[in-house]
Image: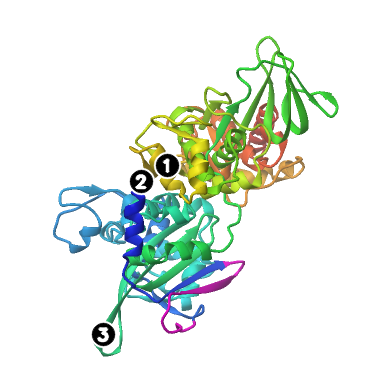
Amino acid sequence: MGFARPALMLATLLAMPAWSASLDVAWWRDGKMEVRQLRQGGTAPLPFDGTRQVPLASLWKLFVYVYATDNKVAMPDYRCGGRDPEEVYCCDAGQSIGHDAALAQSCGPFFSPRRLMIAPASWRQYWTGRLGSVPAGDFAWLANPAQLAPKRMVRLDSLLRALDSIPAASRVDAEAALLRVVLDGRGFGTARWFGSQLRVKTYSWHEQKKGGAGERTGGAAGWLADGTPIWFGGAGGSSNVFEQWAPRLAASLPKMGAADDGGCVVVDYFKRYPIRAVRGERGIAAAGPLNGRYHVQFENGQNIALRSSGELMLLQEKGGRPQLRGRFGVNEYVARVLDREANAGEPEAAKALAIAARTYLQQNAVTVAGCQQIADSSATQRVSPSPATPAALAIARWTDQLIVDGVTVRYHSTLPSEGTMAWSEAVRQAKQGKHYDELLAAAYPGGALSTFGNTGARCRRLAQNEDWLARSVPRWQRVLLREAGYEAPPQAPLVCALSSGAPYSEQSRNRIFMRPLATREDRITLAHEYLHLGLRRHPRGQDEEYVERLARRLVDLNLEAI
């Protein structure tokens, strides 16, 4: 999404046709459905609840996408021939479209169950597992992929419950693709109101009424950033619904819970200031994970207080000099930068700086063993060594995955220049009523608001590795349950093919990246990365020597069983 000119965007919003006098909104949380009706004059709309029948319309494509990605169904690019009128949502004749763009653009021919060769029996088995019973009754529309017709009417609560049945690991790719909707899709221009909180598939439908008259309706369904299933709809197409209702819809959304923090950032602290010692409550801290309050004493005589819950590691460099290293999710990292470089007191300015900091990370970090690695330094970005404040973390989550694309991004506390946003100027403009996207447009005129894949690498699943792990974990339980801090992952991890670098675990997404199993060392590697997931909330999960010893012991248990 290119940064829209503020005056043009305002004129567009003011000139919008009054497509709909009301917007119906529903979400599913804590086992029940909640509804809202937003009104804009006119007569009071009819009330509705979970029994409301809504058209499936193009939402069927989202269910095919999730099934195909979860079951490793091949989704080759679709090549447009120019004869199918539905290709208007796909590509020009002679061009092709991939699965992510096809979902965001609502390309129906791409997701044809016949084209993807989706077997009805496998489809039914998958959704039976998700729903806990064979799709029937209110869920009959999910019983057979051939029944996913746009004109199919479904109960609203069954649609939301079906979305709720899809776990976070299975939503990752779909959510990443659907973030495009508010950037350059049918919700173009509404990222100002939603940030990255809305991950929805749009739909438009011509609803037939008695007597032959019809009414065009539109909206979207999918998830909020914390995984809450949501649906909304009103008169007009989906684009018109977004244009008309975005500010009020954003204000009416339920309070978000904490979402998974994707990605991985390793920070080398105080690179320009040699550390003399790190002291805790019991004296000089030992090498390893830090838990509690500490004082870092520098060779120049300065010192700083910090807190850590295991995310900071004290290392010994060659020669015995102490070094501090942190490991965070991307949003925690961005929030710590916001705390250190500025503050969250002026929300719109803070949103702009959070996006700039995330962009700077993408443009300047190096990738090591699946993590982005960057120094804490005034020459790069300064990063708070203590946990992020709640206000900064809320800003980082609200802007999750958003970056500025197309330009080199820099910022400064007080001095603006070409390609450099000045924090003091951003605060001044925010106090005058400017939104974060306007602040970014002014600082980076050649840039565009886009997304950064901090959900991690695409997962090409290794079935042999996953099968071996599934057989092994039950044998390991008698040992693991005696290990302090071990918590079995809520779902079996996905094991993904590693194209380069060292194996690693992506804890926030419950995924392991490695190579196919071939040797005993490969099996030890898989056990090792599984332990990082199982010990993710405990300091021992950062102790590589301990994890490696335990992994070898677990693999030896497999040999005993054989």
Observer-nearest of 482 and 207: 207
- Residue 51 on image: x %, y %: 49, 81
The amino acid marked with disc number 1 is Leu
- Residue 468 on image: x %, y %: 55, 42
Q: Which residue is mark 2?
A: 3
Q: Which residue is mark 1?
A: 440
**Label of residue 213 in the image:** 3
> In the image, 63: left or right of 428?
left
For marks 1 and 2, the one nearer the N-term is: 2
The amino acid marked with disc number 2 is Phe
Residue 156 visible in this rendered orientation of the protein: yes
Quote the CA–CA distance across marks 1 and 2: 8 Å
- Residue 288 on image: x %, y %: 72, 26
The magenta stretch spans residue 411? no
Quote the CA–CA distance across marks 3 and 1: 46 Å
Mark 3: secondary structure: loop
Callout 2 touching callout 3 (CB < 8 Å): no
Q: Residue at x 31, y 72 (%)?
A: 205
Instruction: Residue 404: name its quadrant.
Output: top left
Residue 399 visible in this rendered orientation of the protein: no
Instruction: Residue 202: name its quadrant.
Output: bottom left
Q: Which residues are magenta?
A: 29-47
Quadrant of the image containing the C terminus: top right
> In the image, 128: left or right of 205?
right
Q: Residue at x 53, y 70 (%)?
A: 133
Mark 1: secondary structure: helix
Quote the CA–CA distance across marks 2 and 3: 40 Å
The amino acid marked with disc number 3 is Ala
Q: Is residue 492 above or below residue 134?
A: above
Mark 2: secondary structure: loop
